Image (cartoon, rainbow, N blue to C red):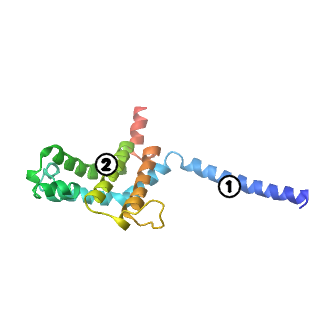
């Protein structure tokens, strides 16, 4: 190849690289500060909000003060081995620490998702949900008997395991909020502007 052809090829490659860099730099500037957090919150809302609200709501006891008196199902799903130990009678289960754990687990499933969706204390809420998902996964494996294909493994060829595949993606979405914040379309942003 002669030097003229080499120059044209190098010029064309440089033009493509400049076009690529220019386009994606402009795209990055257009979405900076609002898109990542908003998109992560939208994905969380779409995939997990109703899942957690339904799960938490079903753990509430009956009546006006049901949020202080979790259902039998709450104890069975959060602390199955403890419930078995006390004959599946929540009244026999000691308040501390078991009732406290069930209450906190129930409230977390309702309060933290709502806070993430509206963008209020989003980073700490997302971090709390990450911890909750890790604990939830441990309980599913250690106490609910989830095993084999349901647990899966990282870097295997199957993308459909509940623990290592699905929940890893949930945690990734939440990590986006922890790292990037909730974005401008959030109560956090309004509070930050107000406080200074």
Question: In the depicted view, which residue is nearer to us: 21 or 152?
Answer: 152
The residue wearing badge 1 is: 20
Q: Which residue is drawn at 76% across and 57% down?
A: 13
Q: Position of residue 77 (x, y in %)?
A: 22, 58
Quadrant housing the C terminus: top left
Total labels: the figure holds 2
Q: Does the image show residue 119?
A: no
Label 2 secondary element: helix
Is 19 left or right of 62, judged from the image as shown?
right
The residue wearing badge 2 is: 112
Q: Residue at x 41, y 51 (%)?
A: 174
Question: In the depicted view, which residue is nearer to us: 3 or 187?
Answer: 3
| Disc on the earlier residue, 2 or 1 | 1
Question: In the depicted view, which residue is nearer to us: 20 or 153?
Answer: 153
Quadrant housing the N terminus: bottom right
Is 35 left or right of 72, judged from the image as shown?
right
Using the numbered discs, state the Cα–Cα distance from disc 2 to disc 1 in whole angstroms. Answer: 40 Å
Q: Which residue is drawn at 23% across and 52% down?
A: 106
Question: In the depicted view, which residue is nearer to us: 65 or 139?
Answer: 139
Q: Where is residue 168 in the image (x, y as percent from the top left)?
A: 42, 56
Q: Where is residue 187 in the image (x, y as percent from the top left)?
A: 38, 44
Is 114 left or right of 164, judged from the image as shown?
left
Circle 1: is it few (<14), some (14-19), or many (20+) Cα within 10 Å? few
Figure quadrant of residue 20 = bottom right
Q: Where is residue 37 in the image (x, y as percent from the top left)?
A: 45, 49
Circle 2: is it few (<14), some (14-19), or many (20+) Cα within 10 Å? many
Q: Does the image show residue 171?
A: yes
Label 1 secondary element: helix
């Amino acid at each position: 190849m002669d030097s003229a052809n080499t120059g044209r090829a190098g010029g064309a490659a440089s033009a493509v690289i400049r076009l690529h860099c220019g386009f994606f730099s402009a795209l990055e500037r257009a979405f900076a500060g609002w898109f990542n957090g908003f998109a992560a919150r939208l994905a969380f809302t779409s995939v997990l909000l109703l899942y957690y609200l339904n799960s938490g709501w079903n753990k509430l006891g009956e009546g006006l003060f049901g949020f202080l008196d979790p259902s039998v199902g709450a104890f069975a799903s959060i602390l199955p081995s403890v419930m078995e130990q006390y004959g599946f009678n929540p009244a026999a289960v000691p308040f501390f620490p078991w009732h406290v754990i069930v209450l906190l687990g129930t409230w977390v499933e309702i309060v933290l998702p709502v806070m993430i969706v509206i963008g209020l204390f989003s980073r700490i809420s997302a971090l709390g949900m990450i911890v909750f998902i890790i604990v939830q996964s441990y309980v599913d494996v250690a106490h609910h008997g989830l095993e084999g294909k349901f647990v899966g493994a990282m870097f295997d060829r199957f993308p459909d395991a509940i623990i290592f595949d699905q929940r890893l993606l949930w945690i990734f979405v939440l990590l986006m909020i922890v790292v990037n914040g909730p974005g401008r379309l959030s109560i956090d942003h309004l509070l930050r502007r107000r406080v200074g």
